[in-house]
Amino acid sequence: MTATGTFAPKPGAAPLGRMIRAQAALETRMLLRNGEQLLLTVIIPSLLLLLFGTVDIVDTGEGKAVDFLAPGVLALAVLSTAFTGQAIATGFERRYGVLKRLGASPLPRWALMTAKTCSVLVTEVLQVALLTAIAFALGWSPHGNPLAVLLLLLLGTAAFSGLGLLMAGTLRAEATLAAANLVFLLLLVGGGVIVPLEKFPDAAQSVLALLPIAALSDGLRDVLRDGAGMPWADLGVLAAWAVLGLGAAGRFFRWE
């Protein structure tokens, strides 16, 4: 029995939900304080939308350019956060031993990945809000089913997160940095984000259409520009990439 005004120590881990929330909040603050990450996840997509939405550089077909560009830039925002930013950050955390130390903490490893995913989702919400405001200022007129948009964004996030974690958990940090940025640039050009896939040769179109960025941008475009229903084909492509990416990341990810 303890005297009044004193405290008895009670060692032990905090509840799992509280640990995940605390780690997710920490991951989000670290991301938002990182200037390079903000450049990649916020500034570049915003500038691309503003530039190509106001200057007639690329032929986007009939209708307003912003109606074509906004869904593609939203897909690019998911790519930049869930894949490129997460791969680079996680790769360097692995190199510096951060993941090894966190893996020895009371927070389970799967819960750490859950916290990272929650951080990605919070960042994407901020990205979508900003890009939507910019697109509306440029005269965007979206249509379609919000549920379809949500499913596309969630499956796109799962697909890119799996691929990003796979890269971060198998390559050296410097190789991850170079590869993630290279993939970002290649998918920006060849993923239907800014340049319509119809501009590419027929043989290339069939291959590019299977990329997760193409499925996400085309699915969002079908819903938000054309008012289509559930884009099942694009959802199927994203689901396949999500299963493959997350499964491979869970199998081959190395913590040190």
Image (cartoon, rainbow, N blue to C red):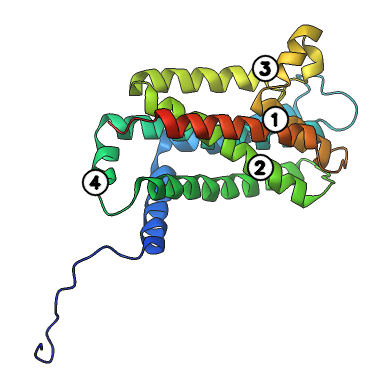
Residue 69 placement (x, y as % from top left): 75, 31
Precedes in sequence: disc 4 or disc 2: 4
Looking at the image, is mark 4 or mark 3 earlier in the sequence?
Answer: 4
Residue linked to disc 2: 153
Q: CA–CA distance between discs 4 and 2?
A: 32 Å
Q: Secondary structure at mark 1?
A: helix
Residue receiving disc 4: 104
Q: Nearer the viewer, residue 77 or 156?
A: 156
**CA gap, disc 2 to disc 1?**
13 Å
Residue type indicated by callout 2: Leu
> Callout 4: few (<14), some (14-19), or many (20+) C-alpha neighbours within 10 Å?
few
Residue 67 locus on image (x, y percent): 81, 36
Mark 1, other Cα within 10 Å: few <14 / some 14–19 / many ≥20: many
* Alpha carbons under labels 4 and 3: distance apart: 41 Å
Residue under numbered circle 1: 237
Left or right of 27 in this view: 212? right
Determine the residue positioned at 75% across, 37% down. Answer: 220
Q: Which residue is mark 3?
A: 190
Which mark is nearer the camera, 4 or 2? 4
Q: Mark 1: which amino acid?
A: Val
Is 217 placed left or right of 226 in the picture?
left
Q: Amino acid at mark 4?
A: Ala
Q: Residue at x 65, y 18 (%)?
A: 189
